[in-house]
Image (tube, grey):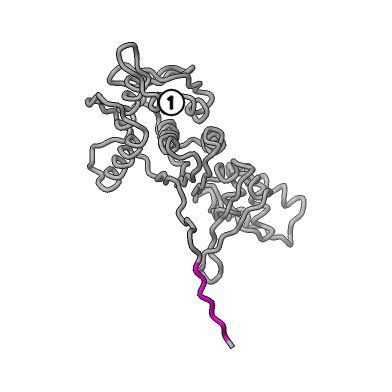
């Protein structure tokens, strides 16, 4: 006998408040801010303008709009009309957004830069740092990426205290040293935000101890299953994470892999001796592959590179 129950659960909000940050970063070409705003651009409008510029850029590669221009216009508006002066009444909310952005960048930008402040030499936005001042438009791809991510999260946070930020491949344009520190810096800068990161970077995978990391893998039936990493897996080296978690069999060029295969084929797990191992090391050194001695042993005893 089968009994069916029709259960209705009411008054449950299934929506998740948050923002999505695309993996694509618009090209950072210098463009003069020709339209100096005469009214305060608040955080909500600035966020909408930023997203609209990104959307147009993604839909049409010939679109000349630049999200950086939207950022510069907003910063100029917030600094001039938000902070105010003896002739212009300040807008406290816009002033807070502007000053908060400066404090956020002190956390998220690389420490070796020594970011200090933002100043304006209209129409340019100047970033003051211990390593030298620079025009915002001239920032490297990695620095601009961090600035852009910080800007989007900050704008969204002005009207939402707790929310989720989904970031797709934040490692794009970032030097490995920046990849290692980015997520920790974002967590420190935005403690009330829950971050969901989609990444192929072993440096980001292992960057946060207090986190849940899931690897998506195909099983024998070609279905995708999620596998939760334990602390030992998260603490692995970049090469081990690439091999065991991300499924990258080896992290050397194809020609070097072929040479490594050729050298390893001379040995099997059954005929390993001290002399053979010494010859293996010598052969690897002569081929310029000495640092891959552990990988060679792993391959010989039956593992995958």
Q: Which quarter of the rendered picture does the C terminus lie within? A: bottom right
Q: Residue at 61% across / 58% down in the picture?
A: 304
Q: Residue at 44% across / 23% down in the picture?
A: 99
User: Of 14 and 202, which appears nearest the observer?
Assistant: 14
Which residue carries the number 1 mark? 96
Q: Residue at 47% across / 44% down in the picture?
A: 165
User: Of 18 and 175, which appears nearest the observer?
Assistant: 18
Residue 229 lies, with reference to residue 27, above or below; the image says below
> Looking at the picture, how far across and down is residue 290, in whole percent?
63, 42
Report the span colored magenta. Answer: 2-8
The residue sitting at the front extreme is 11
Q: Is residue 180 visible?
A: no
Residue 153 lies, with reference to residue 127, above or below; the image says below
Disc 1 secondary structure class: helix
> Looking at the picture, how far across and down is residue 114, in whole percent?
51, 21
Residue 122 lies, with reference to residue 204, above or below; the image says above
> Looking at the picture, how far across and down is residue 229, in whole percent?
63, 53
Q: Which quarter of the rendered picture does the N terminus lie within? A: bottom right
The residue sitting at the right extreme is 274
Residue 100 lies, with reference to residue 156, above or below; the image says above
Q: Residue at 26% across / 28% down in the picture?
A: 31
* Residue 157 inside the magenta-drawn segment: no
> Looking at the picture, how far across and down is residue 172, in whole percent?
44, 41
Quadrant in the rendering for residue 28: top left
User: Of 50 and 157, which appears nearest the observer?
Assistant: 157
For mark 1, does the 10 Å Cα neighbourhood hold few (<14), some (14 to 19), or many (20 or more) residues? some
Left or right: 250 in relation to 143: right
């Amino acid at each position: 006998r089968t009994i069916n129950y029709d259960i209705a659960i009411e008054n449950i909000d299934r929506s998740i408040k948050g923002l999505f940050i695309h993996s694509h970063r618009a090209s950072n070409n210098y463009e003069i801010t020709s339209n100096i705003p005469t009214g305060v651009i608040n955080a909500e409008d600035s966020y909408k303008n930023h997203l609209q510029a990104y959307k147009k850029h993604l839909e049409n590669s010939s679109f000349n709009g630049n999200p950086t221009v939207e950022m510069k216009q907003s910063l100029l508006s917030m600094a001039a009309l938000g902070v105010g002066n003896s002739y212009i009444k300040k807008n406290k909310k816009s002033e807070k957004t502007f000053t908060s952005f400066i404090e956020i960048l002190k956390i998220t930008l690389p420490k070796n830069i020594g970011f200090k402040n933002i100043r304006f030499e209209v129409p340019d936005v100047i970033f003051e740092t211990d390593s030298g001042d620079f025009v915002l438009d001239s920032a490297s791809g990695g620095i601009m990426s961090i600035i852009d991510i910080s800007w989007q999260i900050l704008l969204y946070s002005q009207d939402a205290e707790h929310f989720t930020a989904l970031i797709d491949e934040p490692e794009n344009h970032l030097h490995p040293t920046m990849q290692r520190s980015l997520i920790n810096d974002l967590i420190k800068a935005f403690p009330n935000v829950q971050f969901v990161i989609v990444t192929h970077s072993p440096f980001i995978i292992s960057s946060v101890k207090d986190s849940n990391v899931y690897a998506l893998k195909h099983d024998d039936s070609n279905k995708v299953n999620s596998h939760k990493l334990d602390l030992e897996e998260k603490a692995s080296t970049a090469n081990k994470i690439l091999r065991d978690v991300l499924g990258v069999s080896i992290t050397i060029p194809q020609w070097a892999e072929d040479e490594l295969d050729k050298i390893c084929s001379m040995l099997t797990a059954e005929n390993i001796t001290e002399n053979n191992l010494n010859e293996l090391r010598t052969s690897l050194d002569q081929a310029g592959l000495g640092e891959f001695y552990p990988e060679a042993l792993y391959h010989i005893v039956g593992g995958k590179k």
